[in-house]
Image (spheres, grey):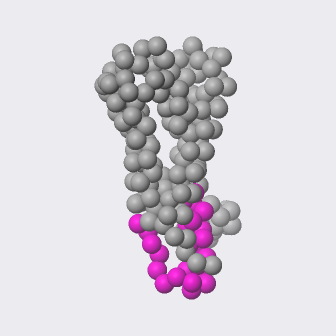
Amino acid sequence: MQRKPFWKLLLSGIGYMLLGNLMSTVMTVAASVVADITGVMIVLFVLTLFVFYSLCFTVAYKDGQREKVMLKNRRVDSVSNSRWIIAGFIMLAVMTVPSALLFTDAKMHLFEGFLIPYRMLCGMIYPLALAMGVDYAGIELLPDFYPLIFAACYILIPLATAIGFNFGFNDRFNPDKIMYEKK
């Protein structure tokens, strides 16, 4: 058992991130029947945030557990804490690219119908976009700060990955330690 290369960690992080966006898109489309109710959209946005960040947390958590086993078996000498922070910032940069393309499309009309793939790629913010009134017909009327708001929704990715690695490495979810720890 060796430490995974950084590019494999990054690919698995991006994969989990895309899975979170896909699951959020499916959840939003399934709830589109009641999309006119504001309270439902707020709850849906909170749930999509939870799903997305849970998956970002999970991929780092699994690596933290693996790192702990490797350190315990003396396969590695020290822990690399900054790997998931760096990977989180790269994942954040990957998720800001669609918002930058949306901003460019709104200003220069380069892509025809980019809003549909944008909502699929950025499923976490799909309910927010619906609540803010972003529709297919008025992409040229999109205010300049909307893509910035959409990109800002992903700002907690490095924090989620760092916390996930820390929880996995320190074995924070072990039921024996939680319930039977002597104080």
- Can residue 173 be seen here? The reply is yes
Question: At 53% across and 31% down in the image, what residue appears?
Answer: 117
- Can residue 172 be seen here? The reply is no
Which of the 4 image quadrants contains residue 102?
A: top left
Which of the 4 image quadrants contains residue 59?
A: bottom right
Which of the 4 image quadrants contains residue 67?
A: bottom right
Who is closer to the viewer here, 156 or 135?
135
Question: At 39% across and 48% down in the image, what residue appears?
Answer: 93
Q: Is residue 80 magenta?
A: yes
Q: Image check: 169 left or right of 179?
A: left
Q: Position of residue 96 (x, y in %)?
A: 40, 41
Who is closer to the viewer here, 141 or 145?
141
Q: Is 143 drawn above or below residue 151 in the view shown?
A: above
Q: Is 26 drawn above or below residue 78 in the view shown?
A: above
Q: Position of residue 31 (x, y in %)?
A: 65, 23
Q: Is residue 112 magenta?
A: no
Q: Is 172 drawn above or below residue 28 in the view shown?
A: below
**Mark count:** 0
First to last magenta residue range: 59-82
Who is closer to the viewer here, 139 or 30?
139
Question: At 60% across and 70% down in the image, what residue appears?
Answer: 66
Who is closer to the viewer here, 39 or 86?
86
Q: Is 59 drawn above or below residue 64 in the view shown?
A: above
Q: Position of residue 164 (x, y in %)?
A: 52, 58
